[in-house]
Image (spheres, rainbow, N blue to C red):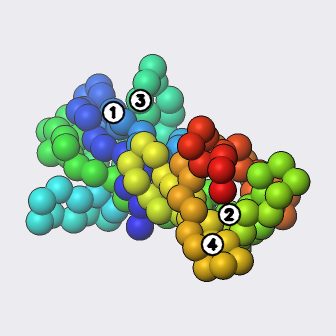
Amino acid sequence: MTLLGRVLKPHGLKGEVRVLPIEFDLHKKEAGSALILKRKHRELRLKIKKIRRGPGYLIIKFEEINSLQEAEGLRGFEIFGECERAKTLEGKKAMAGDRLLGIVKEVIQIPMNPVVVIETDSGREILVPMKFCAEKGDMVEVNLPPGLEEL
């Protein structure tokens, strides 16, 4: 499970909440998608009824939340779910221009900055921020940031 966002506060009177998206995949979730909300020792499983964009946040209506008071109870919960983009990168060749860096082993979900783990032929691991990686068909194109170009 990946941290996708955090509930900021209620929005309106009918149980909607404002959510700060941490992982881009949260934008792609649709009605019916199940999410897990966690805070301290509490865990809730809720289904999205409706999701839309606000300025710098998302507005989510959960099927199970129907009032301002219930929405207020979600304040501060972290939202977890599956990150689809990470799954599509795993196992693909990682290329820097014409040079094969290795194979994408996994994507580590760090809030606001996921990291792609590339395993080289020698078994060494290269960690590259996902923002420097672009999926191109059956491969991942990597634009190495300064400092990693010497690889």
Q: Height in image: 59 above or below 132?
A: above
Considering only order in the chain, which callout, 2 or 4, is on the residue closer to the N terminus?
2
- Give neighbour class at mark 4: few <14, some 14-19, many 20+ (Cα, 10 Å): many
The span from disc 3 to disc 4 (Cα, nearest Å) is 35 Å
Tell whether label 1 touches label 3 (CB within 8 Å).
Answer: yes
Which of discs 4 and 1 lies nearer the camera? The answer is 4
Does residue 34 appear in this view? no
For image coordinates 23% across by 49% down, the residue present is 77
The label shown at residue 18 is: 1
Tell whether label 1 touches label 4 (CB within 8 Å).
Answer: no
Tell whether label 2 touches label 4 (CB within 8 Å).
Answer: no
Considering only order in the chain, which callout, 1 or 4, is on the residue closer to the N terminus?
1
Tell me which amino acid carries mark 3: Tyr
The label shown at residue 89 is: 2
Q: Residue 37: x, y in percent?
A: 28, 57
The span from disc 3 to disc 2 (Cα, nearest Å) is 26 Å
Tell me which amino acid carries mark 1: Arg
Q: Secondary structure beneath disc 1?
A: strand
Considering only order in the chain, which callout, 2 or 3, is on the residue closer to the N terminus?
3
Q: Residue 149: x, y in percent?
A: 66, 46
